[in-house]
Image (cartoon, rainbow, N blue to C red):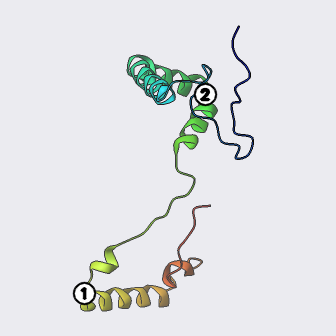
Amino acid sequence: MADDSKPLQDPKTGLFVVGNRGNNGRRKGARNRLHADFIVGLQEHFAEVGKTAIEIVFKESPKEYLKIIASVLPKEFILEDGRLESMGDEELEQYLDEIRRLKSAGAGQGRSDLIEGKKSSLN
């Protein structure tokens, strides 16, 4: 009969007493190995049948196909244009002159956010 009188925790501190090791619980690193094995298996399976499965979904259920595409895209796109940063003063002046010319000609009406430098949102 096992000795159950030895406490698992120190009643004063609540810390586990040294030497008490239960047999329940998973071994160290087990979750990481399971995760890695699953990802490798999924990758191998996709290499075998993934493209065919995508083609079937595309043909038989275009709505679900688009849902899958949407689910793997980032939730938010941040579009930044770094071309202005690399322009010299003379180039920037020419660029601004062209914007002013287009604005006075009425081009881009309804898109004042582009001229005023506001970031546009895709949502």
Q: Which amino acid does label 1 sit on?
A: Gly
User: Between tags 1 and 2, which lies in front?
Assistant: 2
**Residue 96 figure quarter:** bottom left
Q: Which amino acid does label 2 sit on?
A: Asn
Determine which residue is flagged by label 1. Answer: 88
Who is closer to the viewer here, 85 or 27? 27
Who is closer to the viewer here, 106 or 67? 67
> Of callouts 1 and 2, which one flags the residue occurring earlier in the amino acid sequence?
2
Please determine whether, in this image, residue 86 is positioned above or below residue 53. Answer: below
Please determine whether, in this image, residue 108 is positioned above or below residue 79. Answer: below
Q: Which residue is located at x 26 percent, y 86 percent?
A: 91
Quadrant containing the N terminus in the rendered view: top right
In the displayed image of the protein, which residue is found farthest to the top?
1
* Distance of label 1 from label 2 (alpha carbons): 70 Å
**Residue 14 figure quarter:** top right
Residue 75 horizontal/vertical position (percent) = 57, 53
Q: Which residue is located at x 56 percent, y 77 percent?
A: 111
Dot 1 surroundings within 10 Å: few (below 14), some, or many (20 or more)? few
Dot 2 surroundings within 10 Å: few (below 14), some, or many (20 or more)? few
Determine which residue is flagged by label 2. Answer: 20
Helix, strand or loop under label 1: loop
